[in-house]
Amino acid sequence: MMKFLLPVLSALLLFSCQSAKYGDEFPKGCYPHNLIVAVDAKSMVLKWQKKCKRAISGYNIYISETPLAAKYAGKQLPEHIKPLNFEPFPGDTNPDDGIEVYQAEGLKDGQKYYVTVRILMPDGKESRPTSEIMAVCGGRGEIELSIRYKSNQDGFSFIENSFVRADNEQNDLYYYFKDGEDYIASPHKLNGFLRKNSLQLLPLKGEPSEIKTKIKEIKPNSGSDRLAVAAGNWIRLYTAEGASALVRVLGFSGDGDNRKIRLYYAYLPLKDEMLF
């Protein structure tokens, strides 16, 4: 009877170890906390807090095209699911501030990614993951546009994430000043063969972080092919392909032909979505 029981007990112990949650052997709270993801063109920056006082080997960063949290939260990941980093990320160059920063490059604009981070221990075990964040890469930044046709920086392409001329086929918007008012407009206003984008003035004020939580509450409309704008205005721009951008008017400078407009932009290369 004993000889029969030993294999059964061994099998039960093996099954128990394989199905145990990874976080069970870690001290309470010993995992990365408060993950924040900031996206840009084909890249993202991850920040999280380290609260585990045990010696660790580093971190594994998971940026997946499918969600992992619901199925594997606190559990061992299958071998075919690999972290983005080939070697354990040891932490950034400022270990004393309690915040780790990791920059992920070579990602796809317009792809939904599901992001988590886990601590890797010296024995190869991983902690439970951070909360999973869904993020989409797309250009972010500030630009200054000249009045149409007055410089090489009188238009901007969100797809290319670069300046183009106002009459370039990739241009998404241009700026002009008329009768004492500042305007931004769709390129097809210059030439009917250029891109036909639409612009919607949003009844919102505040910083980008505030706008992100409010934008989904505003119903889209057909918009306009030009808008009179003032400093502080937020505009939702719809591209010809159905993608969108949030644009904020930061201010103006100069007079006459030297007048310029300064804009913040956040581009979302996904059709019919508001995931800024």
Image (cartoon, grey):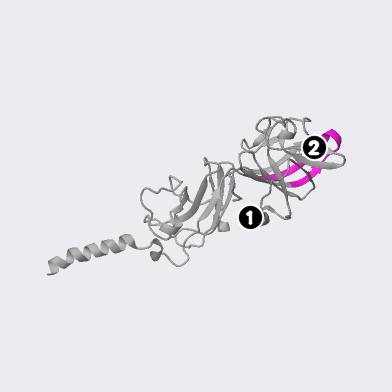
- Residue 216 is tagged as 1
Q: Residue furthest bottom?
A: 1
- Is residue 220 in view? yes
Label 1's element? helix
The image quarter containing residue 168 is: top right
Magenta stretch contains residue 117:
no
Camera-nearest residue between 198 and 111: 198
Tell me which residue sits at (79%, 35%) in the image: 147
Tell me which residue sits at (47%, 47%) in the image: 65
Q: How many marks?
A: 2
> Circle 2 sits on which residue?
176
- Residue type, label 2: Tyr
Camera-nearest residue between 62 and 96: 62
**Mark 2 and 1 residues: CB-CB less than 8 Å, in contact?**
no
- Precedes in sequence: disc 2 or disc 1: 2
User: Which quarter of the rendered picture does the N terminus lie within?
Assistant: bottom left
Left or right, 100 with respect to 199, comes to: left
Q: Nearer the viewer, mark 2 or mark 1?
A: 1
Tell me which residue sits at (75%, 50%) in the image: 233
Tell me which residue sits at (44%, 54%) in the image: 68
